[in-house]
Amino acid sequence: MSKKKLSKKEVQKIADLANIKLTDEELDKYSTELSSIIEYVDKLSEIDTEKIEMKAHNVTTQNVFRRDEPGKSLTQDEAISNRKSSSEGGNFVIKSTLK
Amino acid sequence: MKDLYKLTVKEASEKIQAGEISSEELTKSCLERVKEMEPEINAFITVTEKYALTRAKEIDKKLSKKELRSPLVGIPYSLKDVYVTKGIETTAGSRILKGYIPQYDATVHRRIEEAGGILIGKTNCDPFGFGSSTEHSGYGVTKNPNNTDYVPGGSSGGSGAAVAYGGGLYSIAEDTGGSIRCPASFCGVDGLKVTYGRVSRYGALAYASSYDTVGPIAQNAEDIALIMSVIAGKDPFDATSFEGGKDDPPDYSRNLGKSLKGRKIGLPKEYYGKGLDDEVRNVIEKAIDKYKSLGCETVEISLPYTEFAIAAYYVVGISEASSNLARYDGIRYGIDVEAEGWKEKMQEVRSRGFSDEAKRRIMVGTYALSKGYADKYYKKAQKVRQLLRNDFERALNEVDIILTPTMPVLPFKIGENIDDPLKMWLVDAFTAAINPVGVPALSVNAGTSKDGLPVGMQLIGPHFLEDRLLNFAHIFEAS
């Protein structure tokens, strides 16, 4: 079998960047699947795009402005209504980020 | 009156306005149909029965006072579950959003409600639009009402199936790379991918922000025209929505019925080559003959970069998706899990909540944007996207519309492609090419295979000329 385009180590690195935890079995599966996908999209390198300008949008874009006027918005209770961990102060609560 | 759920939007609207039927009767008929069909089809994630019946009664009162005149007054419809609905659970078909109750309404939903529409439920889909079969949904597979061994297409399979069986007279779905057109084709109904920016995306859970479009699935082009006149137009909440001036949005029904004599239809040779299923080819050729008999001229055209469309589409699309889906961190909404630290918790939420296909796309997108690879993949694909745009611009200067099959294959069996992710991606070849370009494309039911499986044709036109596509489809359907 030919060498996979993406090794398990590389897939692990991508998964870390994407904040996804993978089991060893999944690493194996995704390194096969992701490799075949990357091999497929590699065909883009056949095209000469030297002189092509990169645009990230479909339609001609221009800045869209509006007046900075306060309008109706959600109350604090509404804004946090889908949180899972609650505190008395009405905040989002997360686990400590420092050990 | 019996079987009201079978009416088109236009027929039902006329009967409601004339006082022949009430919105409540029509809504009840659709809800009963949903109860009858859902155990087998599973087109809905949430059915909003109480909400719909209460609304229908209110609308009937307003109708008796002649307060509402829109063609959508009193008409039951469904929304793909990617649109936020205040107080009604919205999941995007993903387990990660199980239990998420939005605090506001998507603009498309608000516009239809203001016009008097009746929401009867939220439809099933591949999570965040990732899929072409609805098999990836976290809420079970949707089956094709034409034959329940087959997929309904995706990602808006629930919307396609619901419209096909009469679970609401139309559905608002979402198309990022074929997610409206594929299920329309596989379920035997019509679906419009609008020009990018034509309908506000505010409140649509994002997949790929430079591709995402909001559009209808309905029984015919006439109905789609009625719906478009209500949902299109500038929205201050979506900066990319099109500013069309004071006569915008146009009346999309105004051109329906205009003669097609002398109009030019482009047939891109790349779409009719190897890999096109013979039965699909037969149905499409018959449709082309019909247009010829209506006075149209056909021209062979070429879209030379077709071969690279899928690769470019996916690289850009999933790069945007990987960035958009970074927001699902388990803090502000979504499922909750127990874990040791902050980072571990986020990873656990995402690992349990995302489907395999979501993980694949997020990871390939992350790779394509990562240091050392962004030039090779993301930027390269954006440049190829420009070449695709040039292809279509050139072609659409020569012809009035481009006609292709919507899907190169007939609906496939449930389970047939699920283990081969790349193969599943490749069935989108004809639909996914359109979103990077941004032009409108309409899938129209063109007939069926020998075994009765629906086949759709795709009509593609210049930016913002949805009404031209609707007229081509309407004439085809009316003759």
Image (spheres, grey):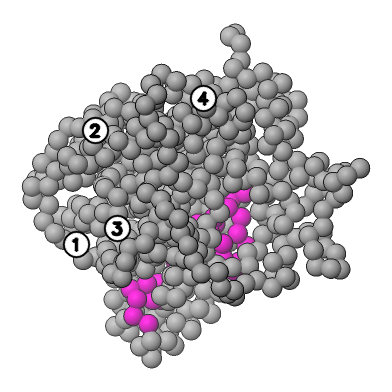
Look at the numbered discs 1 and 2 and tell me whether their residues touch, using CB distance below 8 Å: no
Frontmost residue, B445 versus B381 = B381
Say what amino acid the circle numbered 2 marks: Pro
Q: Where is mark 4, residue-wise?
A: B376
Frontmost residue, B305 versus B17 = B305
Q: Which residues are magenta?
A: B68-94
Give the crowd class for mark 4: few <14, some 14-19, many >=20 residues within 10 Å: some
- Chain under disc 2: B
Of badges 2 and 3, the one in the foreground is 2
- The first of marks 1 and 2 along the sequence is 1
- Chain under disc 3: B
Q: Is residue A28 visible?
A: no
Q: Which mark is residue B268?
A: 2
Q: CA distance from mark 1 to mark 2?
A: 26 Å
Q: Which mark is residue B255?
A: 1
Of badges 3 and 4, the one in the foreground is 4
Q: Which mark is residue B220?
A: 3
Q: CA distance from mark 3 to mark 1?
A: 15 Å
Query: Is B109 placed left or right of A52 in the picture?
Result: right
Q: Which residue, as the protein is rendered here, is positioned at the far top?
A: A1
Look at the numbered discs 3 and 4 and tell me whether their residues touch, using CB distance below 8 Å: no
Give the crowd class for mark 1: few <14, some 14-19, many >=20 residues within 10 Å: some
